[in-house]
Amino acid sequence: MNKKWIRIILHCSFWAVYLPLHAFLDCINSGKYDFNSWAKFVWQESFTLPVKIGLTYFVFYYIIPLYLDRSKVGKMVGLTFLSFLLAAVLHRISSSYIYFYFNPPAPEGKSYWEASLMVWGIFDLYITVMAAAQIKMLRIQYKSQEFEEKLLREKLQSELNFLRAQVNPHFLFNTLNNLYMLARKKSEHTAGAIMQLSGIMRFVLDDCRSPLIPLQAEAKIIKDLISLNQLRYNDRVTVVYEEQLDAPDVALAPLLLLPFVENSFKHGADKSTGPARIHIHLEANTEKIVFDVINTTEEEPPDNENPNERFGIGLQNVERQLDLIYPGRHQLLIENRPGQYAVHLEIQP
């Protein structure tokens, strides 16, 4: 069913509810609470309903647009007055002459044009238009809010896509550097490293297009990256990798954990003249993912440095992705202590 028919059904539903409800209010106003009186008022109101419908849609689709054009305020006021006056006359004709023509006898000795009846007719029309307008305004407000939320989601998605577009070349650049160092050493492991890099590139270019991937896929790339880096550093770096995946298929945004591992090599092994140590621990269940990376470092943080200062675009990028994808559902702690750099991340998937 298209939107046009849905809109028609909604409008018809409003008037179908309005008619018996207005008749019920007429019963309360007249002090008659039996079913026959209610049915009589429903029948009588049905004669004035076309007038109310006509006035309501005239206000909606002609007068309200004039209100939005400030140069036509005078025209709007004049048309509003004339339309309500004309509608009040038609209201009296339909509720009196036409109604009693089909439902005689008409009451004798009573004028249908008394001022009180005209005022009541205008008030009745006003209440009807205002009730319909209130529902329309609520609908407009809801659509406006929905549109703003859609724009916000698109903005956040665009920002997230941009962040991921930054991560991919940043990660591949670092990996190619490792391969370059192996080639310079003429290592016998260069061919195997190229195959590992091929697998990593396939993961980055293909699998990372999905908004979420299984955690075990990210864990595999982490282990491949560790293996690739150990070929470069040989025995100078000791890497301890532990994982306890009770829910290996739990969904995770791609390339969220990898930059922390890259950072541990970059600011640990790269900037250490002696042996370096990296400890990585990953555990997950259906409720929480916990990831810890601790690496030794010979760098001493300056006295005026924030102990939680982040290194490089990679971690800044990941922090922003966490804020966008897991707002209020993650905790990231980074400590830059003398001789040690530690990362603790918890995510509620």
Image: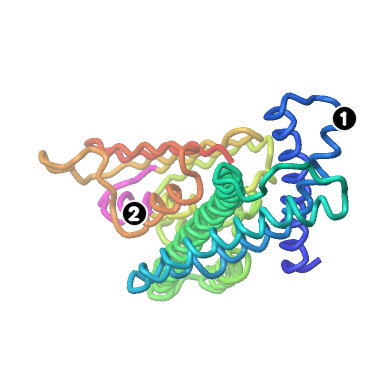
Q: Nearer the viewer, residue 197 or 3?
A: 3
Residue 167 position, x and y percent, is 43, 64
The answer to whether 172 is drawn above or below residue 37 in the figure is below
Residue 142 position, x and y percent, is 55, 52
Q: Which label is found at residue 316?
A: 2
Report the residue at 47% width, 67% height from top.
Answer: 79
| Mark 2: amino acid | Gln
Give the magenta-colored segment's residue range: 263-277
The quarter of the rendered structure image containing the C terminus is top right
Mark toward the start of the polypeptide (2 vs 1): 1
Q: Is residue 264 magenta?
A: yes
| Mark 1: amino acid | Phe
User: Dot 1, how many residues are within 10 Å of its Cα: few (below 14), some (14-19), or many (20+)?
Assistant: few
The quarter of the rendered structure image containing the N terminus is bottom right
Q: Secondary structure at mark 2?
A: helix
Residue 200 position, x and y percent, is 56, 66
Report the residue at 72% width, 45% height from top.
Answer: 18
Q: Which residue is mark 1?
A: 35
Q: Nearer the viewer, residue 205 or 84?
A: 84
